Amino acid sequence: MEFDKVINERKSIRNFSDQKIDKETIESIVESARLAPSAANKQPWKFYICTSDNIKALICESYDREWFTKAQIYIVACGDHSQSWKRLSDNKDHCDIDIAIAVEHIMLKTTDLGLGTCWVCNFNTQIVKIALQLPEYMEPIVLLPIGYYQDDYKPDPRNKRRKDLNEIVAWL
């Protein structure tokens, strides 16, 4: 897909079909995150690919929305703050920024492959930590439900509500 088309067609998807996702497609999606840049190349992330019914059910307990339960897989993007780069002048931790960049790579790749996802950060982290048996130092930051769209769905970039360019840019 042409890159501008991917950017324009990417949107939060909340209506998944029950079509299965093959392992090669999932690996391609995660590979896009692996290639993402990170501060000082620390790569303070780990991506948990949740495909088993038991783990998926536990992940769904952390975010109680009907649409969320319809995804074929869940990727839990986690950060390790002990590995992330901290800015010297103020000790700002770039872990969340690095995760955000990698997750955006995942979101763009899913769009490119004809799948959908939705950035979910309003979830119960304790449920996820227990479900995935995460070590104390690993923080679940984003949940990504992934699946193919319902048959009747077609991305419409004209429906994106975004601020005008002049509201977000300052030319100096």
Image: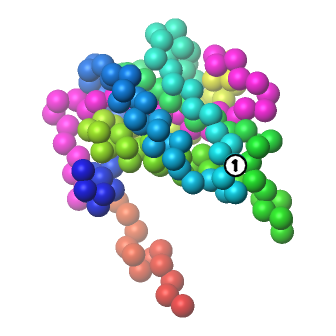
Within 10 angstroms of label 1, few (less than 14), some, or many (20 or more) residues?
some
Q: Which residues are magenta?
A: 131-158
Q: Quadrant of residue 45?
A: top right
Badge 1 is on which residue? Answer: 42
Q: Secondary structure at mark 1?
A: loop
Q: Position of residue 107 (x, y in %)?
A: 41, 44
Q: Is residue 19 above or below residue 125?
A: above
Quadrant (top left/top right/bottom left/bottom right) for the C terminus = bottom right
Q: Where 3 falls versus 17 (above or below)?
A: below
Any magenta on residue 135? yes
Where is residue 106 drawn, in percent x and y? Answer: 44, 42
Q: Is residue 32 left or right of residue 151?
A: right
* Residue at 25 percent of width and 56 percent of height: 2
Residue 66 in view of the camera: no
Q: Residue at x 26, y 20 (%)?
A: 19
Is residue 101 shown in magenta?
A: no
Up-down relation of residue 164 to residue 58 (above or below)? below
Counting from the top left corner in percent of width and height, residue 157 is at: 25, 56
| Viewer-nearest residue: 67 or 115 | 115
The residue located at (78%, 56%) in the rendering is 86
